[in-house]
Every structure is written in C-alpha cells, then in structure tokens.
Image (spheres, coloured by chain):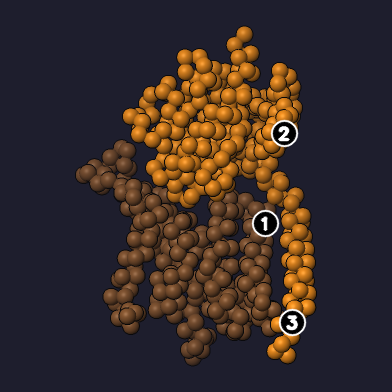
Amino acid sequence: MENRTDKNSYTILFAIGMVLVVGALLAFAASFLKPNIDENKRLEKQQNILYAMGVNENDESNANFVSTADAPELFKKYIEKQLVIQGADVVEDKEAYLIDVKKEQTNAKAGNERKLPLFVGKKDNKTFYIAPIRGKGLWDAIWAYVAMDKNMVVQGVFFDHKGETAGLGANINKRFFMDDFIGEDLKNNGTFKGIDVAKGNADPLNKDKSDNEVDAIAGATITGNGVSAMLKSELKLYVPYFETLKN
Amino acid sequence: MGLLSKKDAQLITDPLADNNPITIQVLGICSALAITAELKASLVMAISVLFVLGLGNVVISLMRNIIPSKIRIIVQLIVVAALVIIVDLVLKAFAYELSKTLSVFVGLIITNCIIMGRFEAFALGNGPWKSFLDGIGNAVGYGVILIIVGFFRELFGSGTLFGIPVLGDPIAKTGLYAIGYENNGFMIMPPMALIVVGIIIWIQRTKNKALIED
C-alpha cells in the first residue's frame, strides 16, 4: 500500500475532499455562531459609545465598560438622538449606531456621499456628540468613538484596534493614553486642526489642552501616527455639522 | 509506575529543558519576540499554543496514514488554520472579551513554526497518544520561555506584572521611582526579547555542557 498515497489521482482527490470537509465545517461553525457573535458586537458598540461619554465603570487605572447586561438600558437612557449626516441632510435614525463605518468609507471611495453617524447623548445636563471613526494602525484597523461638546472639544474617547502589537500599539485602549485626550480642543483658533499624537512634545503630563497634541506611546510610532491621521481626516467630515450648531 | 511509561514521560519533559523548542531548536522565535512585552499576552499565547499543538498533533497523527506526502505541508497548514479559526469563532460567540485579547494572536498561532515543526517531525510518524504528549511537552516548553521573557520585559520595561504596578508609580514617583529608578523603555522593544532569549540560552548552556555544539 506504500504507493497508494503517492499517486497523483489520490493526491488530487484528497485535496478536494479535504477542502470540502474543512470548508463545510468552517461554514457551518460560522453561520451557526453568527447570531451570538452579532449580538456581542452590537452590545460592544453600545458599551464603546457609552464609554466615550463617560458612562463606564472605570476604576483607578483600568478602563472598564458597563456590563453587557446593563448596556442596552443605559444606551436608551443616555443617548437621546442618533443622527445620520449625509451632505446637508441630517436625519434621525434609531439604528444609526449599527452603521458600518468601514462600509461607508468604501462607499465614499466609490464616489457616493458618505453617511456619517453621530450620537447625541446627555449626562448631568451636558450634551455630548459622539462620532464613530475608523483608520489604520501598524498592522490592521484601528477605530475610535470620540465624544465632543458642541465646540469640538474632546470630552472622552475610546480607542480600539484589531491587531496592534501587544504592550506597544495595543496600549491605545488603555486609560493612560485615552484620558490624555479629554479636554483637548480639536480646533485651533476656530479652525479644525485635529489632535496629534506627538513624540517629544514638551508636555508629557498633558497639562496644555489647547496645543492640539497629546503624548505618544514609546515604541508605538506608527500606531500613534495612525491615530493622528484618523482623527484628522475623519472628524474633519463632521465640521460642517458642528458649524450649524453655533447658531 | 506512574500514569506514563518512562518513554512517554520523556516526551513531555525533554522539550521543557534539554530539547526546548525555543532555546535549543530555535523555533517559534518570531512569536516569542512579538508578544512578550507583557506577561498577560505571553500567558494567553502559551495557553493558545498548548491547546492548538496538543489537538493538532492528535489530528495529524490520526490522519498520518492517509495524508499524501506531496501535499502534507499544506494539509498541516489547513488543519492548524481550521482549528484556530474554530476556536476563535467559539470564543467570539461565548467569551467575547477573551476573544478580543486572543484575536491578535490568531495569525501568529497559525504561522508558528513550532506547530508545523512538531506536525512534520513527530505527529506524521507516531500514534495519537504519543503525539498528544509531544504536543503538550513542546507547547509547555515554549510557554515557559515566553513567560520568563514576558516577566523580565514587563517588569523592567513597564514596572508592572500582569498590568499591576509592582515597583511604584513612575509619574507620581513612589516606591523604587522615589530613589531615582527609571523604567527601561528599551525592554519593551522587540530587540530586547532577542537579547533576553539569548541570555536564557547562555545560562542553559553553561549549566548543561552537553548542549554546546562545536
């Protein structure tokens, strides 16, 4: 029987069989588990949005979300309006938080007008405008939920990433980095400028909130540059809407 | 007489020291450099590899007589990839938080040369039980080194272990930092992982002269 597995016909049949079996197995697992996975992702979005506007269970130094069990209820309580901005049109949409920013970015590249979701939340009589944005890190996608007041001053932010280096770029979702953004002005003398994740700025404790800079993470230069670029290019799209709030 | 015969026990104990996949076989170095800046990441990676290598070795061993030798490497790759993807999907559905920690490693597990190395060198020629033990042994040997490297890199690089500050607060200058100690930022860069692994290899070879090659 020694030669049996060396035959070309056997090899080809084995390859086809293997692909069919493994393919079917993976397809089955993926579709069987999809409802659970989608539900987890939906709750995570609610948790992220709430986190940005300060509804979270942070302890001394760690970032903690509200529990998944509480998230839907708190989301209803704190998020007053969900808007979809498309050009000059602003419409309310109760499921704007399910808009896939990645798909919208691809859509926009194809020349279509992009749908920009924006969530309006209210907590302790303060109004928060929370924008979901997405960009590129070193290895893969990074994304953020940025809560601003009506003057585009950052009130809170939540960063996350798909596959940045553990211990370096992956630290963008840690509080020591995210908390630095709170209070930073996205504008400079009234024009939109963004916030730079800057190396070697002279303000490591981040006391200067109007310098459009926060301190970078050592060893995570490219992830940091990705964060800067994402904030700049994505939040710029929201500027026309914020202009209308001034009246 | 224990649970394992002497030969079987060797399958587990050998890779822990004298035939360690990282320090002796010099396999799996890429992931050892990439993810050991933190102890927690090292531990998650060690456990993931333990699971995948143990199970993968058994699957390959069961299939060893029907795998065509011409395409065996691709077959091994598919088995690993399928295993890792299924584990990732199950975690995403039932342990979402954990899956987020792990998703970074999925690609690194699939391409980990220890896994392919053990499939090729051991599971293709041995029975499922022996292959299982060999998988466990090698994964533990790999994990031990990862955890040692992660321990030193996180301790000296960030002053924390599992994210918990152990040397005081570097910004408020408490604990060791009060007397002028500083974190060594170089420790969290990948080159230091290589140097730490090098030091481990050095120590190991000083202790066991039999390992020194000409």
Of the two numbered discs 1 and 3 in the rendering, the one whose residue sits closer to the viewer: 3
User: Farthest residue toward the front?
Assistant: A8
Q: Secondary structure at mark 3?
A: loop
Subunit bearing disc 2: A
> Compared with residue A18, is residue B11 higher up or lower down, i.e. above or below?
below
Residue at mark 3: A7
What label sits on residue B89 in the rendered view? 1
> Compared with residue B124, is residue A64 higher up or lower down, i.e. above or below?
above
Does label 2 or label 3 sit earlier along the sequence?
3
Residue B203: image quadrant is bottom left
Say which amino acid is labelled 3: Lys
Q: Residue at x 43, y 28 (%)?
A: A213
> Chain B: what color?
brown
* Discs 1 and 2 carry the same chain letter: no
Q: Identify the image quadrant of the C terminus of chain B.
A: bottom left
**Side (left or right) of B199 relative to A79:** left
* Discs 1 and 3 carry the same chain letter: no
Q: Residue B121, can we see it?
A: yes
